[in-house]
Amino acid sequence: VKTSVSSLAVVGGMPAFPDRLNAGQNNLPGWERFERSLRDIFARRYYTNHGPLVQELESRLAGFFGVKNVICMTNGTIGLMIAARALGLRGRVIVPAFTSVATIQSLTWAGLEPVFCDVDPLTHRITTALVEPLIDDTVSAILGVHLWGNACDPREFEKLAEKKVVRLYFDAAHAFGSVHDGIPIGRFGDAEVFSLNSDNILNAAEGCCICTDDDALAESLRNIRSSYGIRTPVSVPITGNGRMSEAQAALALLSLEDFPGNRMLNAERFDSYRTQLAAVPGIRFIEPQQGDQSNYQHVVVEIDSKGFGLARDALKRVLEAENISCAHFAPGGWHRRKPYADLFPQYMNALENTDIISSRIMLLPSGQQVSSKTVSSLCSLIGFIHEHAAAICVELERVA
Amino acid sequence: VKTSVSSLAVVGGMPAFPDRLNAGQNNLPGWERFERSLRDIFARRYYTNHGPLVQELESRLAGFFGVKNVICMTNGTIGLMIAARALGLRGRVIVPAFTSVATIQSLTWAGLEPVFCDVDPLTHRITTALVEPLIDDTVSAILGVHLWGNACDPREFEKLAEKKVVRLYFDAAHAFGSVHDGIPIGRFGDAEVFSLNSDNILNAAEGCCICTDDDALAESLRNIRSSYGIRTPVSVPITGNGRMSEAQAALALLSLEDFPGNRMLNAERFDSYRTQLAAVPGIRFIEPQQGDQSNYQHVVVEIDSKGFGLARDALKRVLEAENISCAHFAPGGWHRRKPYADLFPQYMNALENTDIISSRIMLLPSGQQVSSKTVSSLCSLIGFIHEHAAAICVELERVA
């Protein structure tokens, strides 16, 4: 691909990839199948408000997860906001600062205060050891995050929540179809909230589903969502609009059919990246936990600048120019970003692992858009960048 | 249609209408045009997060309204919630209790307290005379509602807001394409928020657009919405997810093309209902204000039980059985419903006009689903019910 440092796009060469590659999944069903679904929606003239396709999706997902209740919503942020209200939370909620911003926003919209928690430096996930010391009388819940599709020890968290009498729910945006210790993510805690954004393996363009075995909680979620899907009217602190449209449900149903194939493709890509980058020093893959099954929707690496020869930011800059977009994720941890840095300055220097990880991580492109040839080209390119790291450093200074 | 009281469906006869008729608009473009838009979305593989169709929709709507900024969102409730946050409101906000529940919910989600206001008994809308006495130091804004597509005197409210130094914004869910005194709704107050729910004349299945000439407010709205559509990063109190998908924008763009035709159809239906029910006593139409243009998306009548011979609830019951669903709207006023009745019991008996109107109003079906023949049949049926009101009363008691 690249034969000399001067051929890199960042110093004026042609980009290695003609089309921009992003880190999200962006998987799509074939047009013919989607067209059929949409024709049916038009024939029925029923587009939203708990239509037949949303009902079918909820029922299929309940079977997929093996839970009693699945409640679909229009996006994950709304889902998390409505979950916080339905759980009747008060005061403060423990949440990692290293997560999607939606996890934290949802608390603010629900009138709650986040208690920012650090994460394990190897897995990037919260642990009960990190969370337990933060629980006091002002804390009403733990909002766990199954980061990168890997479970954050839900059984240990269930024990902790029971012991401390706090509610436990999960942002499972990354973990659709992941399995922990033989049990699908979706069956843990009081509820688990999945985003069906197009970045994720299950794609409703925008969308969300919430799993719970607690029938009373499910009724509250349905009542707060506001749609014909309310089964029993129950008293809720507030209502909202979380309705999923029929077009969203149509896309999600097709994406659900395609899930096994998309998961396999993700696993292959993950494996290719890992194999082909094994010889490049300073790159560490975030692996699924032993014994668990991941959906492999994220290919996440940490760049150690000493080993690799370039810091993460410099590598990202070189790759961006080659048309590889390695998404920002929780840049610096949300405790360091507005509005949270102003509201809760006490966390500024309190989350050491989050700070270190934030400066090192990088997401590599995957999903249907990425062929095995693309993976090979990208791995070669990263290898080339490592080999010429010193010369590239000089060039980057020059063109800065 | 009906020749005897015993042939009414409520006492066991066949329903007059084989398919259920609802009070919303539910207008659709032809399938071929929508299919073309969706094919393009699939070809681009770009489904959400401020894609090309959302950008086109915002630009076209800005032209339609003649405003500097239009910001699209995924639904009206979210739009109102984000507007309240972007305006930086604090404390209490004056709002009519006679409105869609979303108007009021949005305040609660934004951490604000509603100050429930009564409405004018003839127009069903708030007036400055009703609002002014409620303004005190705890009030930061007025949230007006252009009920039934008719403007609630925006110029007088602009003067009042300036005098009292409070913010002014409008829930314009009913008023897409309505014109007040030569100026389109969308250009008044600090911002106007339109729902593009399928019930409304502009249909994005679910959707919303916010109009404002205030560039700083527009940037806040875009930043809180969270999408690539952020132009300038500005400091906001919180972010959220209000992203509109490309499929929503595709539908809205086609619906915008169809707007003149749909408006004309609505005006014709409104006129037919009014003409054909003119001879039936006890039915009063809520008319657009003199000199204004309405989108006529709602056909709203008040039933006076003395004149008509049956109360509204009895008439609704008879019509429901005939497959005519005359939507509930703000049943009893939201000050009388949970959770607001518990939170703010002081309003329980304070909104006399709202209480009276709530017991009398009825929405009649309109939009593309309703032919002129259907209007005639329905008017004949209502005439028949009036003529046999006494006998029907007896029958209703019998089958209750």
Image (cartoon, coloured by chain):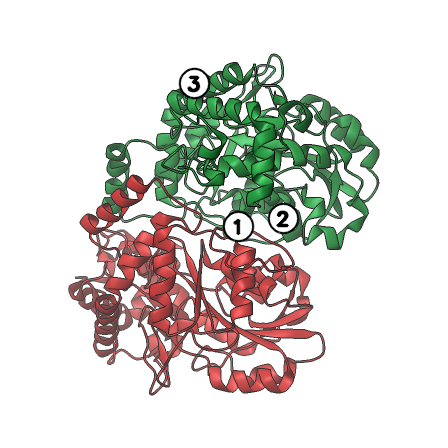
Chain colours: A red, B green
Residue drawn at x 28%, y 60% as measured from the top left:
A255
Tell me the SS state at disc 1. loop
The reply to whether residue B323 is in sight is yes
On the image, the x and y values in percent for residue B376 come to: 43, 20
Q: CA distance from mark 2 to mark 1?
A: 9 Å
| Residue B377 location (% of width, % of height) | 42, 24
Pick the front one: B255 or A8: B255
Disc 2 residue type (three-letter) = Gln
Between disc 3 and disc 2, the foreground one is: 3
Between A382 and B142, the one nearer to me in the picture: B142
Q: Earlier in the sequence, mark 3 or mark 2?
A: 2
Q: Would residue A315 be visible to someone looking at this image? A: no
Along the line of sight, which residue is nearer the eye, B209 or B321? B321
Q: Is residue B336 above or below residue B119?
A: below
Q: Residue at point 39% right, 32% down?
A: B27
Asked if badge 2 and badge 1 are on a common chain, one would say no
Callout 3, which amino acid?
Met
Which one is nearer the viewer's eye here, B383 or A6? B383
Q: Which residue is mark 3?
A: B264
Classify residue A104 by image quadrant: bottom right
For disc 1, the chain is A
Do residues under tags 2 and 1 come within 8 Å of each other at their CB atoms?
A: yes
Q: Residues at badges 3 and 1 in contact (C-beta under 8 Å)?
A: no
Residue at left offset 21%, top offset 76%: A276
Tell me the mark number nearer the camera, choosing from 3 and 1: 3
Circle 3 residues within 10 Å: few <14, some 14–19, many ≥20: few
- Horizontal side of residue B74 vs A399, given as left or right: right
Q: Which residue is mark 2?
A: B105
In the rendered structure, the answer to whether residue A253 lies left or right of residue A81 reads: left
Chain of the residue displaying label 3 = B
